[in-house]
Amino acid sequence: MKEKFRLLIAEDELDLRMLLQRTLTREGFDVETAANGRDALRILKTNPDFDLLITDIKMPEKDGEQLMEEARALCPDLKVVLITGYAELQQHYQLMKKGAFDYVTKPFKIPDLLEVIDRATGVDG
């Protein structure tokens, strides 16, 4: 059941962050948000029992790649889905090799993101 899955969203764009929080909460997930990578890492340090981190790659203070590496050092089983507005396939490939579960490219459709989340959490759509 989805409500047992805890998601942390790190997104510097307020409107997108709030949209994702509302949508994913409505889908039954337990969702927390952070406005940047530094805040997301602080949340993970105090409460590491998240199942999935959804993070923008380009953020101020600590980008998604740094966040992913530090978060996975703290929580080795944490799955990471990257959000990017940049279609740099080589960078995405490198991040997948470093441990990202998957990525979505902005602009994305919510059903596409939900499909990735369902795969990451083992939920059957």
Image: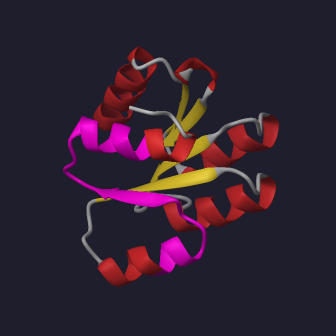
Where in the figure is residue 109, as x and y percent of width and height? 20, 41
Q: Residue at x 57, y 18 (%)?
A: 3
Magenta residue check for 124: no
Residue 11 visible from this viewpoint: no
Q: Where is residue 14 in the image (x, y as percent from the top left)?
A: 35, 35
Tag count: 0
Relative horizontal placement of residue 107, taking residue 11 as reference (left or right): left
Residue interval drawn in magenta: 94-117
Horizontally, residue 53 falls left or right of residue 11, namely: right
Q: Is residue 32 visible?
A: yes
Report the front residue among 49 and 124.
124
Image quadrant assignment for residue 62: bottom right
The outermost residue toward the front is 124
Query: What is the image's colouring?
Result: secondary structure
Q: Nearer the viewer, residue 4 or 13?
A: 4
Q: In this view, does 31 lie above or below 98?
A: above
Write the residue at 56% across / 46% down. Answer: 53
Residue, far bottom: 90
Q: Residue 51 at x, y = what percent?
A: 64, 39
Q: Could you tell me which residue is drawn at 26 percent across and 36 percent down?
A: 110
Q: Check the image and report above or below for 118 versus 84.
A: above
Residue at 54 percent across and 67 percent down: it is 65
Quarter of the image that includes the C terminus:
top left
Q: Is 101 included in the stretch rendered in magenta?
A: yes
Locate the N terminus and report the quarter of the image it occupies. top right
